[in-house]
Amino acid sequence: MADLSDRVPPQNIEAEQSVLGSVLLAREAINSVAEILKAEDFYKESHRKLFQAMLFLTEKGEPVDVITLVEILRQQNNLEEIGGISYLTMLANMVPTAANVEYYARIVKQKAVLRQLINAATRIVARSFEAGDNLEEILDEAEQAIFQVSNRSGGDSFAPLKEVLLDTFDHIAYLYENKGGITGLATGFPDFDNLTSGLQPSDLIIIAARPSMGKTTLALNMAQNIGIKGKKPVAIFSLEMSREQLAQRMLCAQAQIDAHRLRRGYLKDEDWEKITQAVGLLGEAPIFIDDSASLSVLEMRAKCRRLKAEHGLTAVFVDYLQLMRGSEKAENR
């Protein structure tokens, strides 16, 4: 394999020139381009400076053409660096129409994202070679670096209020037609679901009570109902009990068998049929259990990301938060 340092990074000079030429051709093109590109997305340094000058003129409310650009670039001592008046004229004559400017801009953006990905990967390689570093922190930094590149690759655009109101109206109509319905994840506890309309996205709920009051049982029952009745993927992190203990608890709850009697082996003949049915239901439910001891925040976040990518993830239950480890750099996090 060739040394990566000898390879030319992803770029498309013709697309960059077409973007700049389109802006010179039609003043309104800069608005479309500015929503997609930043100056640093251009591969050539001269193109970056030229685009910055275009943005500067636009912000001042001045026209963007060869004459105004020559003036501002002279003031910045950048005119010769970008290729002089002849290069600006060539750009202006390069494209017949500005109609395809967004298409050209997206090509430039794609190449920029690939370069950012290469830079992120290079940093990850360098960090991996550093001795004595915490493995969890390196893994977290690697994931963060890749996610940052992914987030930069596209952004939310403004939505006209009219469109938002149409979606909102449809949602209100749905609520009206389903009065009292659960809009989030149904936990199987009617009073709780009526108060909250179910577990909503991004909710953080802490179950607090004195020891041995049933906090774990309540959380497991909620997870069980979401997984079995709702058929939604659920993650359970058990930092205190083993996965076998959790499975036994869930099995007893589903089969409606006394856990103390099961632990002692005093099962009746009819209990076996209940257990068999419960095993079938729980086995088909998208419930995932992790019983890693002394789990850190970074490890849990990484596991949730992977589970989300592989199976989808609607709810995460942690038993219990006090047993989680913080990172060495931020113990209170």
Image: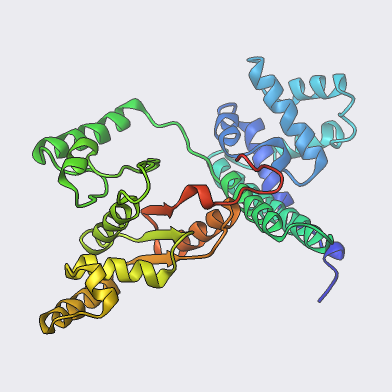
Question: Is 312 placed above or below 150 here?
Answer: below
Location of the N terminus by quadrant is bottom right
Q: Nearer the viewer, residue 122 or 86?
A: 122
Q: Nearer the viewer, residue 326 or 10?
A: 326
Q: How is the image coloured?
A: rainbow
The answer to whether one can see residue 63 in this image is no
Counting from the top left corner in percent of width and height, residue 216 is at 35, 54
Residue 319 spot, x, y in % from top left: 43, 54
Q: Position of residue 133 (x, y in %)?
A: 78, 57
Residue, far bottom: 269
Q: Is residue 144 above or below residue 34?
A: below
Relative side of 176 to 78, left or right: left
Residue 49 appears in which quarter of the rendering?
A: top right
Q: How many circles with numbers are drawn on the protein?
A: 0
Q: Is residue 134 left or right of residue 254?
A: right
User: Residue drawn 43% across and 64% down?
Assistant: 241
Going by the image, does 62 lie left or right of 210?
Answer: right
Q: Looking at the image, which is closer to me, 211 or 106?
A: 211
**Foreground: 317 or 177?**
317
Identify which residue is drawn at 51% across, 57% down.
Answer: 305
- The image position of residue 200, as x and y in percent, is 31, 42
Placement of the C terminus among the 4 image quadrants? top right
